[in-house]
Image (tube, grey):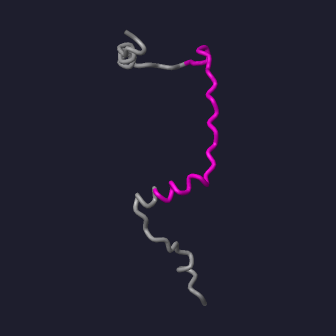
Amino acid sequence: MANDIAARERLEPDLTLAELCGASARMVPHWPAARAASPVPVPPSLILGVVVEPSSVRLIAGAPEYGA
């Protein structure tokens, strides 16, 4: 009777993180990237129940791009 336990084991060497990153980078051309769908704007009337803490409001209000 044959010993099937050894046949099921993966006999791959341990890879370092750098080697794994390099192998992944070489595989990139073989993986098709899905095109991201454009987000659809949501009308403000559908945004309900959003609670913003006062400290966050002050933070955003103090940013030159959004507030003062």
Is 28 on the left or on the right of 21, as rendered? right
- Asked which quadrant contains residue 46, the reply is top right
Is 46 on the left or on the right of 18, as rendered? right
Q: Residue at x 62, y 36 (%)?
A: 36
Number of marks drawn: 0
Q: Residue furthest bottom?
A: 1
Quarter that holds the C terminus? top left
Specify start and end residues of the magenta stretch as a single range: 22-48
Residue 6 falls inside the magenta stretch = no
- Asked which quadrant contains residue 21, the reply is bottom left
Q: Residue at x 52, y 72 (%)?
A: 10
Quarter that holds the N terminus? bottom right
- Asked which quadrant contains residue 16, the reply is bottom left
* Residue 55 position in % (x across, y down): 35, 18
* Of residues 17 and 48, the one drawn nearer to the viewer in this rendering: 17
Q: Is residue 32 above or below residue 1?
A: above
Q: Is residue 63 above or below residue 38?
A: above
Is 46 on the left or on the right of 13, as rendered? right
* Residue 3 position in % (x across, y down): 56, 85
Q: Is residue 3 above or below residue 22?
A: below
Is 38 on the left or on the right of 17, as rendered? right
* Residue 6 position in % (x across, y down): 53, 80
Q: Residue at x 51, y 56 (%)?
A: 24
Q: Is residue 25 above or below residue 42?
A: below
* Residue 63 position in % (x across, y down): 37, 16
